[in-house]
Amino acid sequence: MTNTGLVVLEGGHADHKSVSNTMQINRLGNEEPETNGHDQVVLTNAMAGKNYSGKHEDMTLEDIYGKDGDFDDEDDSDWEPIEKHITIATWFCVNCTLVNVDGAIYCHICGEHKESGILRHGFLASSLHEADSVTNNSLERNGKSKATCSQSMAPHKLTAVGFDERMLLHSEVERKSHPHPERPDRLRAIAASLATAGIFPGRCHPISAREITREELLMVHSDENIDSVERSSQCVASYFTSDTYANKDSALAARLAAGLCADLASAIHSGRAKNGFALVRPPGHHAGVKHAMGFCLHNNAAVAASAAQAAGAKKVLILDWDVHHGNGTQEIYEQNKTVLYISLHRHEGGNFYPGTGAAHEVGSMGGEGYCVNVPWSRGGVGDNDYIFAFEHIVLPIAREFAPDFTIISAGFDAARGDPLGCCDVTPAGYAQMTKMLTSLSRGKLLVILEGGYNLRSISSSATAVIKVLLGENPESMLENAVPSKSGLRTVLDVLKIQNNFWPNLEPIFSDLQSRWGSYAVQEIKKKKKRRFVVPLWWKMGRKKFLHHTLSEQLRLNSRKRIKSSLWF
């Protein structure tokens, strides 16, 4: 059976090899982390490598070191492993999903304890101890002293939170060599953080979930998108793209997520809630008019904007701080003057997923200027660059636009520690950006969860944002932010382009050029060229190096002396 936009697995997808024909789906009530299970890596003679005929006489050592192909001119025909099968037990970090050798107690990437309690207590759980340990300083800062204050408040003054456990049913059925980053534990960790801190349930008002209707989806999506997502409910496992999975419950989860966002937008704009946070998945900002992609099925932010306008909002601002450009949201609204889309994201000349979102993408067909992209040219971007861009691009344009309703597409994958985003935004940085946006649209603000794949980062950042929605000030405010050279160049490039559509940017652009112009054009001093070092595996031969490393690892395992993870 062939479906447009949907690849159905029958015995395993071409890019996703199935480990077992029997596929188990994680159900509700299963509190065990699906990313912290044990796995085994089995090495056999078949993995010893492939012999390539012919010589590589024209290649330098550096060429060979950087070669992607697996070749080895050394004759290893006389080499045999000690055992036919060498088995090494491994475990996946519940926090960042990366693999670790069984003898290690802490993740060698993020430092999380093997038996972390992050799914019970969120980021308030100690990263250095087992499940029931909670850090005292975290409890002091995030204690439940204010948990009962909502009981004396009128419901219409509360911050509303949208959440439904059925969204946890959306998970990748097929077991791979590595857990999928967009996993149910993302919601579990945030919910655990809010519960431990007494925020939700407690200080926030829950709203009931409902499934979005087809008519509402058709305001932003085509029949092609809606039908392809719906067809996934007929399959045990399916894929829209190689990284965008679905199971038989994914369509339901997507409808619930979109329905919650629509109802939150309506409640906030009508005054029944002060503001809100949509704790939803699957995420949405990559989903375009026709296609699901990038972990996203339906575009939750676009649905919320449509609902806000149906409730009476004439102009809506969508601010997207996910580390990836929201190509789907841009596609849906790039010809619409009533919705202003502003995105801050890694771009790197189109080499960072999804490759869209260059500064010159400003909208089309009468919507020019209502698409504002701030494309970072590198990773590692932190609070200073984001706050600087907010002060000089986001807020000036947003105030001129004067929205009646504001939506944040809040991906937390630009957060410090995220394995995909590799940036450096802190919870305080996210809180300050949220605080700055509360000055718009009379505080009518809806925050919608998008990406974010380090559980400690995403839960601490989401909690910091919700505290601002509740009226608390950020723990720290960055004043007089000094941008990096690359960040300043990006801001100046965007101002130069958007100045054609927003005249109020001209004095800002001129002022920045006069004060920072020379700083922006300074060339970064070239680092002294490092001497090329021949890698150990080249000296020994790849296969012998592998055998040497694994044998040493087994010896250490047997003596219980592993103190760190295996690196090679």
Image: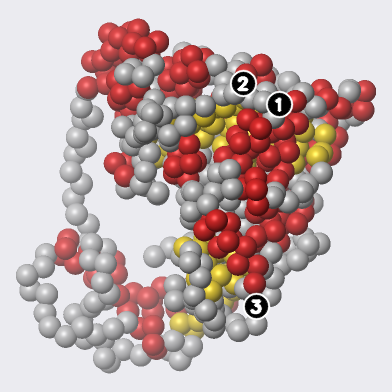
Visible residue check, residue 267:
yes
Looking at the rendered structure, the kind of residue marked 3 is Met
By what rule are the colours in the image chosen?
A: secondary structure
Query: Disc 3 and disc 2: Cα gap in Å?
Result: 47 Å
Indicate the position of residue 433 as horizontal and vertical percent values. Answer: 56, 25
| N-term-proximal mark, 3 vs 1 | 3
Disc 3 target residue? 23
Looking at the rendered structure, the kind of residue marked 1 is His
Location of the C terminus (image quadrant):
bottom left
Indicate the position of residue 16 as horizontal and vertical percent values. Answer: 49, 73
Secondary structure beneath label 1: helix
Question: In percent of the image, x 44 and y 86: which residue is there?
Answer: 44
Q: Is the residue under label 1 in contact with that under label 2 (CB below 8 Å)? A: yes
Query: Disc 3 and disc 1: Cα gap in Å?
Result: 43 Å
Q: Which numbered disc covers residue 507?
A: none
Looking at the rendered structure, the kind of residue marked 2 is Asp
Indicate the position of residue 285 as horizontal and vertical percent values. Answer: 53, 44
| N-term-proximal mark, 3 vs 2 | 3
Residue at the right extreme of this rendering: 152
Nearest the camera: 3 or 301? 3
Up-down relation of residue 345 to residue 521 (above or below): below
Mark 2 neighbour density, 10 Å: few (under 14) some (14–19) many (20 or more): many
Disc 2 target residue? 404
| Front of the two marks 3 and 1 | 1
